Amino acid sequence: QVQMQESGPGLVKPSETLSLNCSVSGVSISFYDWSWLRQSPGKGLEWIGYIYSSGSTNYNPSFKSRVTISLDTSKNQFSLRVNSVTAADTAVYFCASFTSGAHYGMDVWGQGTTVTVSS
Amino acid sequence: SYELTQPPSMSMSPGQTARITCSGDALPKQYAYWYQQRPGQAPVLVIYKDKERPSGIPDRFSGSTSGTTVTLTISGVQAEDEADYFCQSADSSGIITVFGGGTKLTVL
């Protein structure tokens, strides 16, 4: 049974870098594709990007190259970095995975972690 | 940029049938997915590939598609179905993932 847990600072200063990890248990991260998403207060879901089992990535263009997603197979986790954050980056950040395959939807999610951008 | 359009809210009485729509120009070419999100919780996948139901999802949840609109149907709505529902798909290139704005289902 795949389980996922986000972790990282809950408070980030404007213009700094937001860094989050998603720890995965129950399967090797080398096997599936992984995703980061976020949800601003009272708003809908926003896709940030994917990292595929091959290590290649696909990012939402709206983030204008501020985003990096990477795998750490030694720790069985994957990470998100968002540079030059502003108050608009305040959100609940979720990691999710496609454990049944790419066209089967994001079927496992972490519980989410709240990040506030404020000085 | 590509958008998926959902009604913002819907109110139903228990036992009624709720039909939540999601419209987008690329939906005839791209699969749609539906997620249920209860307050304070992570989303849960309830429909994948337009109309398939993951294991563990009650059979009162179903999906359908017609042209540029996909529909999530909840037959015999129950109080526990009160939640936000989001559709998800991709743009015509299949590269960019997009979510609808969400529909808040209230069960009165």
Image (cartoon, rainbow, N blue to C red):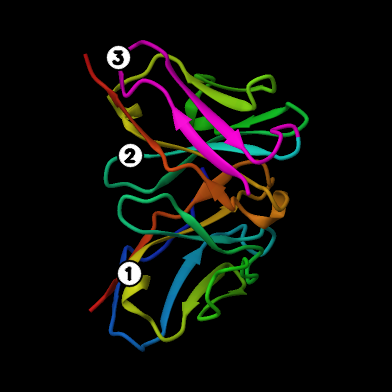
Residue A95 in view of the camera = yes
Please give the residue where the numbered disc 2 appears in the rendered image. Answer: A40
How far is disc 2 from disc 1 in space, using C-alphas?
Answer: 21 Å
Amino acid found under the numbered disc labelled 2: Ser
Callout 1: chain: B
Q: Is residue A13 left or right of residue A74?
A: left
Tell me where residue A19 sits by quadrant: top left
Amino acid found under the numbered disc labelled 3: Pro
On the rendered image, what quadrant is the C terminus of chain B found in? bottom left
**Residue A26: % across, % down:** 65, 41
**Residue B93: % across, % down:** 69, 45
Does label 1 lie on the same chain as label 2? no
Crowd rating for badge 2 (residues with CA inside 10 Å; few <14, some 14–19, many 20+): some
The answer to whether the residues at label 2 and label 3 have Cβ atoms under 8 Å apart is no
Q: Is residue B95 left or right of residue B4?
A: right
What residue do we see at 73% from left, 26% from top? A55
- Mark 2 or 3, nearer chain start: 3
Question: B100 or A81, which lies in front?
Answer: A81
Does label 3 lie on the same chain as label 1? no
**Closer mark to the observer between disc 1 and disc 3:** 1
The answer to whether the residues at label 1 and label 3 have Cβ atoms under 8 Å apart is no
Question: Dot 2: what SS?
Answer: loop
Residues in magenta, as a range = A1-30
Vertical relation: A20 (above or below) A26: above
Please give the residue where the numbered disc 1 appears in the rendered image. Answer: B82
Residue A14: assigned label: 3
Question: B72 or B82, which lies in front?
Answer: B82
